[in-house]
Image (cartoon, rainbow, N blue to C red):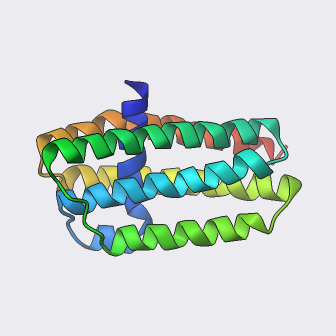
Amino acid sequence: MKSTVCALVAAGSFALLSPHVQAQNVTDAQIASIVVTANQVDIDAGKLAESQASSPEVKAFGKQMVTDHTGVNKQATELVTRLKVKPEDNPTSKSLASGGNENVKHLQQLKGAAFDKAYVDHEVAYHQQVLDAVDKTLIPSAQNADLKALLVKVRPAFVAHLEHAKHLQSSFTK
């Protein structure tokens, strides 16, 4: 159940990262694409944190992001397959992919505490944006009851990720 919640939260929350999501209603097929893309963005950054972070806590957080968001993508894929919904690429999913690639390129240039801080700062901002997108766009726009239920169910995982990232972030200011 925890992985289902994490998957849905991760998938739905990232939509806010793009102004396109706020500017328009999105279809279930577009929501599916946004969710998968948003999770992949966090998986890619998490893998980098696992290998490059200097802090054991940041490495562990990166590993958790990979595990949780991989689980979410699996759940989201199973749902859209069952619902016979084909994820539809859209401006938000494209923006997410591009932003994720830029973030990873930026992080690859950093080392030590600078990497740790930049990774965690991004995770705080990203998860907050995801929560906003889930609340303001994805849940209200979802037409399929199962998709909407999944988004609602995974939301607490995004909250937990955000709180964990904020806790890590606070250690950089001490």
Query: Relative to residue 81, is residue 32 depicted above or below?
Result: below
In-front residue for pair 103/164? 103
Task: Give residue 73's position: percent from left, percent from top.
Answer: 40, 45
Residue 41 in view in this figure:
yes
Task: Give residue 148's position: percent from left, percent from top.
Answer: 20, 43
Query: Relative to residue 109, is residue 6 depicted above or below?
Result: above
Left or right, residue 157 beside residue 165:
left
Quadrant of image for the C terminus:
top right
Residue 120 in view in this figure:
no
Residue at 71 percent across and 41 percent down: it is 168
Task: Give residue 21's position: percent from left, percent from top.
Answer: 31, 68
Residue at 27 percent across and 57 percent down: it is 31
Query: Relative to residue 82, is residue 48 depicted above or below?
Result: below
Residue at 83 percent across and 59 percent down: it is 114
Residue at 38 percent across and 33 percent down: it is 5
Left or right, residue 31 beside residue 142:
right
